[in-house]
Image (cartoon, helix red, strand yellow):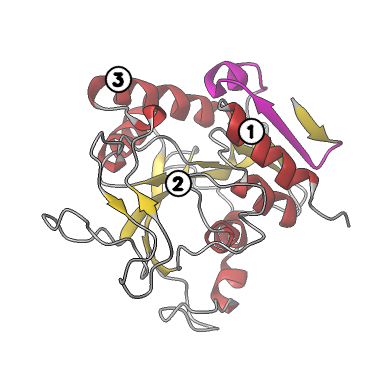
Amino acid sequence: MTSDEQRWRLIRGDCLAGMAALPERSFDLAIADPPYGAATASEWTLAGGHELPRFGGAWRLADHDWDRLAGVDGLRFTLAWLSSLGRLVKPEGSIWIHATYHNAGIVNVACQALGLEIINEVIWYKRNAFPNLSRRRLTASHETIYWVHTGGPRRRRYRFNYDAARAAAFDGDALKEPGRQLRTVWDVPNNKSREELAFGRHPTQKPLRLLERIFLVAGTPGGRFLSPFSGSGSDLVAAVRAGMHATGFEIDERYHAIAARRLAALPRG
């Protein structure tokens, strides 16, 4: 485990075992970025020096062993970690879950089975999405983010920073104007800054600007944040920047090390 007093704590290990040891109703917000079940053994690649406009360098289709969950096993695993989050997050808090078409249906069914009400389904529109290299499908240009709470339909006590979300303006988002309500389609480029990649990268790393929007909508300054699948630590970094006390789990040694370095480099104050 690595930590920085009360600002953040990062545990290397399985999140299910780790969350079982935490006290119930002890977190104000959680973001889950679980395996999507999108990995494949295909060899599609985008070589460096390509001529496709608006895209960066070399890229390889995901083929990670940790992202091969599917079918009944995927449902069992989803029910397990969602049940833990349902126990740990306060009724006044909420859970945000990243998904794609590979696992969004499973997450939806699991939420209903566990009595976790979906507040909104957010569509993260990625205008600079990678092209479909096989040329046999439409180019996937969005991901799903479920906003969920633990109180059920009769106890909707979750935190929503409505005024801040309404007043906000986001650079490059053509769908949001200051003073207008925030919609469920978010126009957020998937680019990461040099700062975000300075200590290494994760293949499914989310941009800080996306995560910071979640904290704007539902964060609790001074509250406690939980990340069961921390990866390279982006949501933990966003949590600390938002003034929350962050706890994260990451089972992979490489990504745990990247996340720990990113968190240790955060300025104080």
Label 1 and label 3: CA atoms lie apart by: 25 Å
Instruction: Provide the secondary structure element on which disc 1 rests.
Output: helix
- In the image, residue 224 lies at what x, y percent? 71, 41
- Residue drawn at point x = 30 percent, y = 71 percent: 52
Q: Earlier in the sequence, mark 1 or mark 3?
A: 3
User: What's the mark number on residue 73?
Assistant: 3
Badge 1 is on which residue? 256
**Do the residues under discs 2 and 1 have CB atoms within 8 angstroms?**
no
Badge 2 is on which residue? 204
Chain part drawn in magenta: 5-23
Dot in front, 2 or 3: 2
Q: Is residue 175 left or right of residue 28?
A: left
Name the amino acid type tagged 1: His
- Residue drawn at point x = 56 percent, y = 47 percent: 201
- In the image, residue 251 lies at what x, y percent? 56, 25
Picture quadrant where residue 43 is located: top left
Label 2 and label 1: CA atoms lie apart by: 14 Å
Q: What crowding class fits label 3: few (fewer than 14 Cα within 10 Å), some (14-19), or many (20 or more)?
A: few
